[in-house]
């Protein structure tokens, strides 16, 4: 163009031009030329830069690949792609480069074109959920760097690691943990276990129960020496202590102990005559009742209740007697059942636990009143550290939350100094991790106790905390369980369920413990009534390899009949059929299927077989026929995570297998009705 | 002035090289040296497989001695199986390869992610354990790609 | 090319040409910047699934997109489901066209108004087939009533 302007000019024009050129001072002319060229260069650079944008290059690469595979016709998205989510206040342009993300056939393509792994996009359509809601990062950016694929200075939400992404699941999935979220589920379980909700308001978890003993009458229960040791280091006594270490100074411990050992509330111990107590017989009762299903002794046994190896150093036998005789009188919320023992059995058992396991020292319920000034100081500590948030005590409000609300914890603005001092990257997850590991590490004067989490536990709790975001999640995006009031068993049945604390281990309608693998909701469709009745009175293990076995509660025959009657008529599932054809042909066909599918690998039939599943001898006297069919057809439906594989049986096959297993006679040695 | 500058320069040079800060929470997620997928596989394995195969896949689970043929030690046997065959066994049981039916099919119980994770963990179990590694020169244990 | 030194003239011409080209380029860039790459809004061009998702001779309403997708013997076409009067969702009645439940506007099968109060026809949107074999609707482009996408 420049050349064109130069050459064809007419003569006169050329003269004028030459005249102009001559009149302008040489320096000005040169400056003008240079500036013009610079301007042109800037304009060209702008075009080139726009044309060479990262996303444009990826798009042309992608189009080349697509042409190679699908041929030249058809059209592809061009230009910046974005997912616009006004309700989440997000604009995600990730799909400008991640062009194959929604195509299953791109599963093995190189990045950035790889298709999304796993089943996630089926339930979380990209156009409804975008990318950064789950993955983090800066959605509006259109370059690798700016999108915060790697941490970016001053951008607080870089793309999350696989583990930290679980926190983002938890933001919407507030109550039930979605599948494959190991860390989130674990962190939430730990938060429940350590009673976080007692001190903090936590969105979605406010209705959780707080488990801690009532402190009324503590002087009657524990030895002062034990109490001081406990306050100084709870995990020194109980490895799995749910109470944290409050990092008390020795004088604070003295004061707090003095306060706690003052008489509080109206608690009376039962009168016991210890003459004739027989600890040996107590030991037999201890073993026969299977106390170790819930309690451990020297680390062996259950995890639901406290370790008993050193309990004699903690409590005296008088208190133990009152406790075993009626735990619910002393601690109305306890998980411990009230076993049906007679008074002599209770006495022997208390004598066994108190004497054989350890001798209490310095336990004196009638000790002189502690120094009132010291006790007053102890009371102040009790209030300041919020002990009453977990522990009930006469004269204190129930569950006053002294900690801050945890909503928005996942968006907390953190002070980097304590982390930098410890050589830790000052990110938000690391700050939470450090705080959870030891609150004094980020704030020396923290009131929160140190829970003594292992590293992986602290990481799990950090994930659960990171899920609590400041921005309100649109209600339509929160998944909640349907509002279901906790199950309250009624009437005579309810009284027995409460007395024997069935729901400490078993679940009914989502309420109850998880120690037992047997959910009671449909137990009447699973087991025969006479078997239930017999089992409740004399629980024998059906699964040989199982460590947790139902304790012997000494339930009477009348109570067992009532419980079995209720369970068999009310706790049924209509999806389970009542009867199954059980002719000889079906049995023979079932036997063949049983061998073909290798069932004996896990189940005992006759004298041989594996120890994983229930012993199948005598199934006919135990099981409702329809149950086995329903179970075999879809084990995961009834018990997610079960070891029973789904063999993909047809109904006819399942019925034949049922006919076979129900035909198996009981072994002579077995105690069956 | 120059003296001051020299002093400042010397002080600057003497600063000890900084240790890069650690990403504490990410370290805590790591299960030994396993990647996220491998440790997921390890959990699935512990849940569904360890009763027979043993926690480390050495064929020493508590139910192993009830089985004939017994479960193999993956350190010795896994290499003989191609990745496709491993998947077929996980999803269809050993019967899918025409062997005994003792190892059941998990294809209908596990989702795709769990199967992938299991496959990843199987590779870990088949690697020589720590003691052998120390004697073997130049052999490194698995590392998580950063 | 006498004493009026040609170098001066070359420099001047070069400068002018550079200024003009650079200025034009920047003007073009300015003009381009008026047309944004993307807006904060729902995408106007979107995939609606594969052809086989739509049975032959069927009318499918996509409620989230407010769009009717027709599959006839001649091919695919898409008609907006938003009444041009006040924006209600129109209903399709087989063989009678579209009826708006709010104020009774009616349209024929091609989306042309047969009865008010609506004044304009329902827009007919361009459709295409992506390389991955997905139907794509572009609501930025309207087409003639006889448009059919063969797939």
Image (cartoon, rainbow, N blue to C red):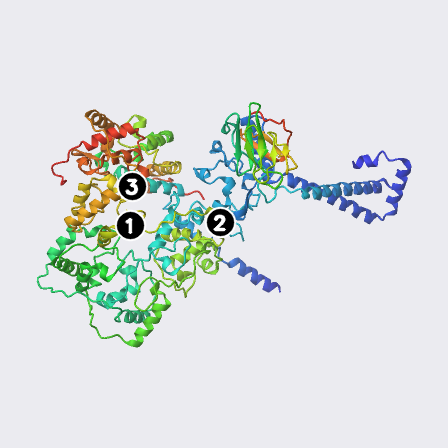
Residue with the mark numbered 3: B55
Residue with the mark numbered 1: A513
Q: How many marks?
A: 3
Picture quarter with the C terminus of chain A: top left
Up-down relation of residue B94 to residue A357 (above or below): above
Q: Nearer the viewer, mark 3 or mark 2?
A: 2
Q: How far apart are marks 3 and 2 (CA)?
A: 43 Å
Q: Can residue C123 be seen in this view?
A: yes
Q: Which residue is located at x 19 percent, y 41 percent? A: A529
Q: Which residue is located at x 17 percent, y 41 percent? A: A530
Q: Position of residue A199 (x, y in %)?
A: 38, 61
Q: Where is residue C126 in the image (x, y as percent from the top left)?
A: 61, 31
Q: Can residue B140 be seen in this view?
A: no
| Mark 3 residue element | loop
Are circles 1 and 2 on residues that touch, CB within 8 Å?
no
Q: Which residue is located at x 53 percent, y 61 percent? A: B11
Up-down relation of residue B35 to residue B86 (above or below): below
Q: Tell me the crowding category of disc 2: few under 14, some 14 to 19, or many 20 or more residues within 10 angstroms, Cα based.
A: few
- The residue furthest right is A12
Q: Nearer the viewer, mark 1 or mark 3?
A: 1
Q: Distance between the residues labelled 1 and 2?
A: 32 Å
In the rendered view, does A8 fall on the left or right side of C93?
right
Q: Quadrant of residue A282?
A: bottom left
């Amino acid at each position: 163009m420049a050349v064109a302007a130069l050459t064809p000019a007419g003569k006169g024009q050329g003269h004028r031009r030459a005249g102009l050129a001559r009149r302008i001072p040489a320096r000005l002319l040169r400056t003008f030329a240079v500036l013009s060229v610079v301007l042109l260069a800037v304009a060209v650079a702008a075009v080139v830069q726009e044309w060479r944008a990262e996303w444009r290059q990826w798009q042309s690469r992608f189009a080349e690949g697509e042409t190679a595979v699908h041929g030249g016709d058809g059209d592809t998205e061009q230009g910046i792609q974005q997912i616009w989510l006004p309700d989440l206040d997000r604009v995600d342009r990730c799909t400008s480069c991640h062009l194959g993300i929604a195509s299953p056939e791109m599963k093995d393509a190189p990045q950035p074109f790889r298709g999304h792994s796993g089943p996630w996009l089926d339930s979380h359509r990209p156009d409804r959920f975008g990318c950064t809601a789950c993955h983090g990062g800066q959605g509006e950016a259109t370059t690798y760097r700016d999108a915060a694929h790697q941490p970016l200075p001053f951008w607080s939400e870089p793309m999350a690691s696989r583990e930290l992404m679980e926190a983002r699941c938890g933001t919407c999935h507030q109550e039930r943990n979605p599948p494959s979220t190991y860390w989130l589920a674990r962190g939430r379980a730990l938060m429940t276990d350590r009673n976080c909700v007692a001190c903090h308001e936590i969105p979605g978890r406010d209705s959780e129960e707080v488990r801690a003993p009532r402190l009324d009458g503590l002087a009657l229960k524990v030895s002062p020496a034990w109490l001081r040791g406990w306050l100084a280091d709870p995990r020194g006594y109980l490895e799995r202590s749910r109470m944290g270490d409050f990092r008390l100074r020795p004088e604070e411990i003295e004061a707090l102990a003095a306060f706690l050992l003052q008489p509080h509330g109206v608690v009376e111990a039962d009168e016991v005559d210890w003459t004739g107590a027989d600890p040996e017989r107590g030991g037999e009762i201890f073993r026969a009742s299977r106390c170790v299903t819930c309690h451990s002794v020297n680390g062996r046994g259950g995890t639901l209740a406290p370790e008993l190896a050193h309990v004699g150093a903690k409590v005296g036998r008088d208190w133990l007697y009152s406790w075993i005789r009626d735990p619910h009188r002393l601690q109305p919320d306890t998980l411990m059942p009230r076993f049906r023992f007679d008074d002599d059995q209770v006495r022997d058992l208390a004598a066994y636990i108190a004497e054989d396991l350890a001798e209490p020292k310095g336990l004196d319920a009638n000790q002189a009143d502690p120094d009132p000034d010291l006790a007053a100081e102890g009371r102040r500590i009790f209030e300041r550290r919020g002990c009453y948030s977990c522990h009930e005590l006469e004269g204190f409000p129930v569950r006053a939350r002294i900690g801050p609300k945890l909503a928005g914890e996942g968006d907390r603005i953190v002070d980097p100094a304590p982390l930098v001092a410890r050589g830790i990257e000052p990110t938000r997850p690391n700050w939470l991790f450090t705080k959870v590991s030891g609150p004094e590490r980020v704030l020396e004067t923290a009131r929160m106790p140190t829970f003594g989490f292992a590293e992986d536990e602290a990481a799990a709790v950090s994930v659960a905390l990171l899920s609590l975001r400041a921005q309100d999640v649109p209600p339509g995006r929160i998944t909640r369980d349907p509002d279901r009031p906790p199950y309250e068993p009624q009437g005579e049945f309810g009284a027995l369920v409460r007395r024997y604390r069935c729901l400490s281990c078993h679940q009914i309608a989502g309420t109850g413990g998880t120690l037992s693998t047997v959910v009671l909701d449909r137990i009447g469709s699973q087991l025969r009534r006479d078997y239930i009745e017999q089992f409740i009175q004399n629980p024998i293990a059906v699964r040989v390899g199982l460590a947790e076995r139902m304790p012997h509660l000494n339930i009477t025959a009348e109570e067992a009949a009532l419980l079995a009657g209720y369970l068999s008529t009310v706790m049924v599932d209509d999806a389970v059929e009542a009867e199954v054809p059980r002719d000889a042909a079906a049995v023979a066909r079932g036997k063949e299927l049983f061998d073909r599918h290798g069932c004996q690998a896990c189940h005992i039939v006759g004298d041989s077989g594996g120890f994983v599943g229930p012993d199948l001898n005598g199934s006919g006297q135990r099981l409702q026929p329809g149950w086995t069919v329903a179970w075999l057809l879809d084990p995961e439906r009834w018990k997610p995570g079960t070891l029973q594989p789904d063999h993909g049986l047809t109904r006819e096959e399942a019925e034949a297998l049922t006919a076979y297993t129900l035909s198996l006679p009981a072994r002579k040695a077995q105690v069956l009705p | 002035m120059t003296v001051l500058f020299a002093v400042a320069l010397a002080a600057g040079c003497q600063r000890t090289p900084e240790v890069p800060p650690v990403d504490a929470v990410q370290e805590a997620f790591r299960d030994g040296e396993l990647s996220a997928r491998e440790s997921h596989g390890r959990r699935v394995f512990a849940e569904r497989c360890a009763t027979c195969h043993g926690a480390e896949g050495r064929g020493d689970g508590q139910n192993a001695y009830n089985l004939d043929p017994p479960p193999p030690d993956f350190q010795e046997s896994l290499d003989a199986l191609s990745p496709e065959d491993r998947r077929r066994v996980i999803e269809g049981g050993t019967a899918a390869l025409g062997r005994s039916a003792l190892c059941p099919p998990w294809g209908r119980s596990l989702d795709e992610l769990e199967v992938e994770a299991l496959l990843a963990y199987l590779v870990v179990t088949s690697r020589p354990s720590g003691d052998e590694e120390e004697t073997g020169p130049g052999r490194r244990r698995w590392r998580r790609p950063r | 090319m006498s004493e009026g030194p040609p170098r001066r003239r070359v420099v001047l011409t070069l400068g002018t040409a550079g200024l003009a080209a650079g200025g034009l380029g920047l003007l073009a860039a300015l003009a381009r910047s008026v047309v944004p790459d993307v807006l904060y809004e729902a995408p106007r061009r979107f995939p609606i699934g594969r052809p086989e998702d739509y049975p032959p001779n069927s009318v499918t309403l996509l409620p989230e997109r407010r769009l009717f997708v027709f599959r006839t013997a001649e091919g695919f076409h898409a008609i907006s489901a938003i009444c041009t009067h006040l924006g209600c969702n129109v209903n399709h009645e087989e063989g009678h066209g579209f009826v708006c439940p709010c104020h009774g506007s009616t349209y024929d099968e091609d989306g042309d108004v047969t009865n008010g109060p609506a004044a304009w026809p329902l827009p007919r949107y361009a459709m295409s087939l992506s390389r991955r074999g997905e139907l794509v609707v572009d609501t930025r482009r309207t087409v003639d009533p006889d448009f059919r996408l063969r797939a």
